[in-house]
Amino acid sequence: MAQGMLVFIISGLVILAYCSQASNERTYQEVVWAVCGKLTGVLCEVTIAIYTFGTCIAFLIIIGDQQDKIIAVMAKEPEGTGGSPWYMDRKFTISLTAFLFILPLSIPREIGFQKYASFLSVVGTWYVTAIIIIKYIWPDKEMTPGDILTRPASWVAVFNAMPTICFGFQCHVSSVPVFNSMRQPKVKTWGGVVTAAMVIALAVYMGTGICGFLTFGAAVDPDVLLSYPSEDMAVAVARAFIILSVLTSYPILHFCGRAVVEGLWLRYQGMPVEEDVGRERRRRMLQTLVWFLLTLLLALFIPDIGKVISVIGGLAACFIFVFPGLCLIQAKLSEMEEVKPASWWALVSYGVLLVTLGAFIFGQTTANAIFVDLLA
């Protein structure tokens, strides 16, 4: 399924680059504003804010999951034992890490310094994939896989996987600034770059997912590293890399969400940014603190990352399919007289297909969330 969706994912990135160049805008939301108008632009900004907020919650849950295993090794306590001291409690360790590292990294106005951690994050990602593949090829004796399903239980299960795929491949919100930061931002060159990047990402995801599933079968945890025993040192290093990656990713997502909230607030107040610089620092501090505390509070009481990803995965489908599709339709409608009829109809039809696919994934995800809550 992921291979088939990759075509649409890559095309969405190319469409955004094309519309960015045509509109001369440099961020995702500004492109949607310029191409699709005010209503769609505001809807896009609100969606970005919700998505980045939910992703920050997921990041904090990931930190807690990995810390639980690392602390169990350091304390030399068997898994599942109760009566741990207060300083080993999950809520305390997540809060301590968040206040010590994430909050200070989230306060600055710019995030350029984050580039120095990017290399370690990439190395860590490849290390995690390599460890999972190695553990599958040379498994530990105590690892016994559960039932290995050779086909999905139903089509519903296939559709339920779509939000997770969208969450994993969603890089579209940050793709527009990246495109404009190229020395020579050309759509053709960009197409080659994103194709190579998505193929690499697909290899990492498939290597991790397939080998992790074959190692543990149906008993595999949604966070595959949690399926391995705590005392495995190679996996412990992988968990440390994941924590490092998340610690640097949270401030970036928060920065994107804060920028959207800032833009919405200033437009609501009718104040251009350059006329309100004096109060920017106070406003930024307040926005950061409220955002941080709310995400931390929700992460402490939502222990299952699968629930968070199922919701924000539906929103990711909007960034991958719906908004790029709308941009393509609107851009081609405005160029109707300049494009050949056959080409015009083909591109508009493809835009409609993207919007329909994204709306389906988002609607299916929302319906699932509602029904699960009702049944619970």
Image (tube, rainbow, N blue to C red):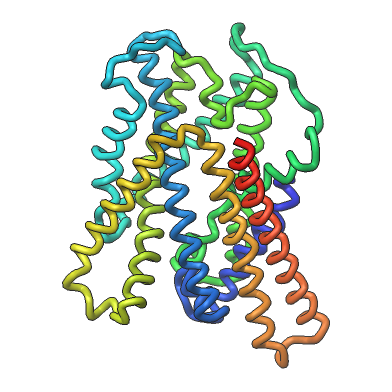
Picture quadrant where residue 361 is located: bottom right
Picture quadrant where residue 35 is located: bottom right
Q: Nearer the viewer, residue 108 or 64?
A: 64
Picture quadrant where residue 372 is located: top right
Residue 184 located left or right of residue 270: right
Quarter placement of the C terminus: top right
Q: Please name the residue shown 27% across and 45% down the image.
A: 103
Estimate the x, y position of residue 321 in percent, counting from the top left: 65, 62
Estimate the x, y position of residue 218 in percent, counting from the top left: 69, 23
Quarter placement of the N terminus: top right
Q: Nearer the viewer, residue 98 or 376?
A: 376
Residue 80 located left or right of residue 326: left
> Does the rendering let one see residue 19?
yes
Q: Please name the residue shown 26% across and 60% down the image.
A: 109
Q: Please name the residue shown 55% across and 25% down the image.
A: 131
> 231 above or below 187?
above
Q: Please name the residue shown 54% across and 50% down the image.
A: 312
Estimate the x, y position of residue 159 in percent, counting from the top left: 73, 46
> 65 above or below 115?
above
Residue 18 located left or right of residue 6: left
> Does the rendering let one see residue 188?
no
